[in-house]
Amino acid sequence: MYALLIKGGFLVDPAQGLYGRRDVAISRGRVAAVERSIPESKAKKTVDATGMVVTPGLIDLHTHTAHGLVRLSVDPVRSCLLRGSTTVVDAGSTGELTFSPFKKFVIEKSDARILAFLNIESLGMLEFADIRPRWTDQEWPRLLTAVEEVFAKMFINIENTVSTIGRNRSTIVGVKWAHHGMRGMGLAREAADKARCRLMIENHFMPQAFKHVKRGDIVTHLYHNYLNPNAGYYDGLTEDGKIRPEFYKASRRGVILDVGHGKGSFSWKVAELGFRDGIEPNTISSDLWVGNVNGPVYDLPTTMSKFLHLGMKLLEVVRATTTTPAAVIGRLGELGTLKRGACADVAVFRIKEGRFPLVDSYGKGRTGSRLLVPMRVVRGGFLIA
Ligand SMILES: [Zn+2]
């Protein structure tokens, strides 16, 4: 007797090359069977997924979920898990000084699976005090970028960062560098090498930043369109309306290109250029934080819908939110797939058809014809929504 049966859905599981009508049976928190038809009589409880899309639980590679600790964070259950993301990766909300309370009071207590990139800055992102009146209303970022050497001495401790990672291998998946100068990026590279883990950097100081990025590392905020106020030029994917050639090279050498939509990091114009000229994302993530959870990001499925609109196939959109991020965090097989024996994390969606406004981080809209709407969520075999 199976504990739970998800019946009648259209299964999209890129890791198994499955794209078609399948039933999924679950027992003891694991996927027990995936077959064309499993009778209801074989399960204690059945979820009717007729007309819906069934995927492995989504993995959101870039979120801010140190809820109640770092003020920019969203509630990982309400904003992520109940929207289909059974695994969320916090991208540097905490550093070596603030990770321990994050683990004790949030990660270990949450129904969502929370993993983390540890910020190279010891305090993490505490400077994002509020979204009012300006979300950079404290002066830290300016100080940090202006006096990099002083900042590095005050706010970065390689040895403690490496030892924190060493003590938390099951939770910390890498080092995060965010927007505070090239000196910090070099130190983040050093820490990641010493801890033998991946580095996630934001898409700034391009193309110079690529010298710090190796195969398997992640560049997030792929499609942002920032004017760098200090340097007076746009940095990121494009320069003078063209894609910087270094991005093609990075992609060829196995650097992971991640969306990280966020409040200021997804531009329709830049994304359309990327899709036209061959820079598509490896992973689609939300960069959910309090500044964008009430729009324009809302959740990961809305972000995925934007990539359907850009012409990405459903199979590839699901690959970029399950298989590939699972491989990036070193968990493919256990997570990111519904093959027999895998952890029973499942998301069930309805694809609504119609006309939907899809707004980027700069207030520009497109009209989508398909919207992914999360309907049911299973986490570790438990039906939670
Ligand atoms: Zn972020």
Image: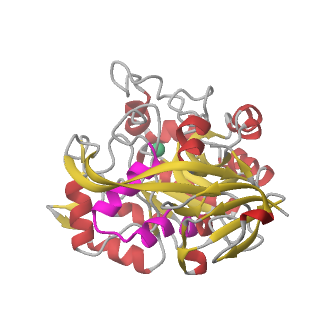
For the question of whether residue 121 can be seen, the reply is: no
The one of 34 and 189 positioned closer to us in this rendering:
34
Reply above or below: 68 against 303: above
Residue at (80% x, 50% y) in the render? 167
Query: Going by the picture, which residue comes out furthest to the left?
Result: 240
Residue 186: x %, y % from top left: 51, 56
Asked if residue 308 lies in the magenta stretch, the reply is yes
Residue at (41% x, 45% y) in the render? 179
* Quadrant placement of the C terminus: top right
Residue at (35% x, 40% y) in the render? 263
Colour scheme of this structure image? secondary structure
Residue 334: x %, y % from top left: 72, 67
Reply above or below: 143 against 195: above
For the question of whether residue 263 can be seen, the reply is: yes
Residue at (33% x, 18% y) in the render? 133
379 lies left or right of 375: right
The one of 136 and 75 positioned closer to us in this rendering:
75
Residue 254: x %, y % from top left: 48, 76
375 lies left or right of 168: left
224 lies left or right of 342: left
Q: Which residues are magenta?
A: 299-325
Task: Locate residue 312: give its quadrant.
Answer: bottom left
Query: Going by the picture, which residue comes out furthest to the top?
Result: 133
Asked if residue 6 lies in the magenta stretch, the reply is no
Residue 229: x %, y % from top left: 24, 40
